[in-house]
Image (cartoon, rainbow, N blue to C red):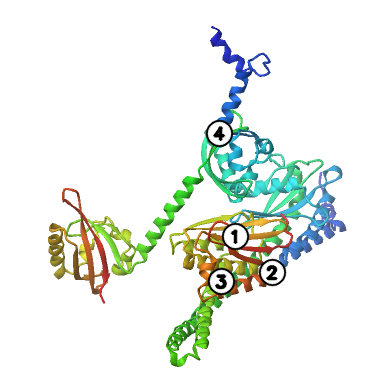
Amino acid sequence: MAIKIKTWLEQFFNTFSETASPQPTHIIEAHEALNNVAFAIATSDEINKTLPPLLNVVEAQLNQQFNGPEQCHVNVLFSSPSTSETFVHHPSDSTPSPEMLHSLHRYFTNGHNDLINDACYLDALVEHPFPDPLYGYKLTESNEMNIWLLITFPHKVPCANQVRWKCTAVETLLKKGFTAWAQQEKKISKAIASERAIHAAELHDSLAQVLGYLRIKSAKLDSLCQSNAYHELKPVTEDLAAYTHYAYRQTRELITSSRLSMKGDNLTQAILDSVSEFEQQSAIVFEYDNRLKKNITNPQQSMQLLYIVRECLNNIVRHSHASHARIVIKEALPSHIEIYVEDNGIGLDAKKARNDSFGLKIMHERAERIDATLIIQPHPNKGTQVILRLPIGDHHE
Amino acid sequence: MHLLKWPASVFTKGNDHRPLGESNIHEALFNSLGDVVMLIDQQHRIALVNQCWESITGVTVSSSLNLLFTDFLHPEDVKIWHDIIRKVFNSHDSQLVWFRIISADGDIHWCEMRLQQLKADEHYPLSATLCDITPQIRNEQIRDASHRSLQSLVNRLPAMLYRSRNNTSWTMEYVSSGCEELTGLRPEELINKPQISYGELIHPDDAGYVWNQVQFCLQTQQTFELQYRLILANGESFTVKEKGRGLYSESGMVLGVEGFVFKFE
């Protein structure tokens, strides 16, 4: 019965050293690989480019754990609750089927938002309308963006506990990576917004004030030079007054556009805000028809497009004598977006009589800067039609 | 007795013996309707739809069958569609919804849909009626625009427009936003509030003059023009000008007073 304490201790340390024996090298390597993935995500500048090769690694690691027919596919889904956009990132060597993309888009954006917002994981065994059985883990959560890790099993589906247990390491590390990435992105966009706010305020206080003063003075000078005594000066002062007036207006628009685009670089929202703003100044019926399913313009394009649309709205309110105006934004094939701004007013020819075509000139210049084509023409029925066509690169769901 | 029997034969499927006229009548009725009647299957495809569909969408019935209903919806309204389906399932009742349908020529048609389950105990298929309400929406937009335009004009004026009751407190029934600049009070603080009244803002030395002048003009049904002082809550005092008139019933009874007040500088 009795046992020597020495023997007991020896036995104890033997068992201990057996369990604590160094982990097999492949586990350490796997862990290191996943750590590197998390680090690469956290420090990524362009997540769209960084992610696909990393997902290859993650998929390979997971498939080492699932044997035979239980091989899985890994995707990462970004869904934005505020703009109803979904992006699915997949490993560079496998693309999910269009049906899968379609049902993911439908599930994560349309009508299920509150269900999705509350859930932290999705089980394949629960009835979901996906072509392939799917497990999902929420990696990060915020108002702007939810990030999900999705694992599909096209052949044989392991049970929920198995999947959860085997995915824990991947899930934890990806969670860390994406949380850090999301924080970083948030910091950057905050920094950009505050920088823009400073610039806008600076413009407002300095340049706009001086231009405002110059505008009044140059207009006065021009009116003084209308008399015959100064007829030689007249063309110069007219130009001076017109250009100063325009410089002033452009500065004001610049300030407004940078304020508007600060609300999250969302072109369609910024246009909607502009429509509501101009709506308040007139009795014109504005119809806003945005058929874009998601934002596909970059900040620079958005800024120029917004400026051009605002210039059109400005013209409609000031000069068109219209009772109806319509703004349509839609995708046109192949890979273009088109913006129509139409009114039923007196038309362009009648407006041309006025001595400032600056607005139109600047609109053309701005369109050129982003390789967009701008057509300003009489509307087939009545009034004016502005068509803005912008080529956009390929974009994936 | 025979008469009681014939409806049964109409509803019996695959009855080859029924007269031709009877078999067509339901289809004719279905297609003669001025509203769209449709059936939507589990994948949200159009399983059945009547002729009226073509007049709204410009797409023939035969080429619409088996297409997703959401293909016809305005992208911004797809969420409304999914929401309403969930509502139908949760309430087990029919639901009414408005959305935009894009027709073949790219035009927008505002539509009102009533949607319900075909069978009480099964989610799908869904049955729906749909009608084009674009003209009503257009009229509403015009009304809204003119209301909005008038509203913002009134609220931007550098004066306070009002309609008040004819009492010494001058209890306000309506004041425009100019009220805030003039009195420092928001319109909702002055409207129908017995605690704070416009009458209390009038300088005590001028209150009698204001009352008497207005009463005189109301009796003679003339417009009145006044100049008096206001004292605000912060003690600030200044002179205002007011022009107004009475509101009378046909029998000449005074119903209220309307006018505008602005700062006299």
Which corner quadrant of the image does residue B243 belong to?
bottom left
Residue matched to label 2:
A371
Decide: few, some or many residues near mark 4? Use Cα within 10 Å; few <14, some 14-19, many ≥20: many
Parent chain of label 3: A
Kindly report the distance in space between the C-alpha atoms of the residues bearing marks 1 and 3: 22 Å
Q: Which one is in front, B146 or B113?
A: B146
Name the mark nearer the viewer: 1 or 3: 1
Q: Is the residue marked by circle 3 packed among few (<14), some (14-19), or many (20+) residues within 10 Å? A: some
Residue B24, percent across and down?
62, 22
Rendering coords of residue B239 (x, y %): 22, 73
Reading the image, the residue beneath label 3 is A258
**Subunit bearing disc 4:** B
Q: Label 2 is placed on what type of residue?
A: Asp
Which one is earlier in the sequence, the residue at label 2 or at label 1? 1
> Mark 1 packing: few (<14 Cα in 10 Å), some, or many (20+)?
some
Amino acid type of disc 4? Gln
Identify the residue at horizontal 40%, vertical 60% (top origin). B149
Residue named by callout 4: B116
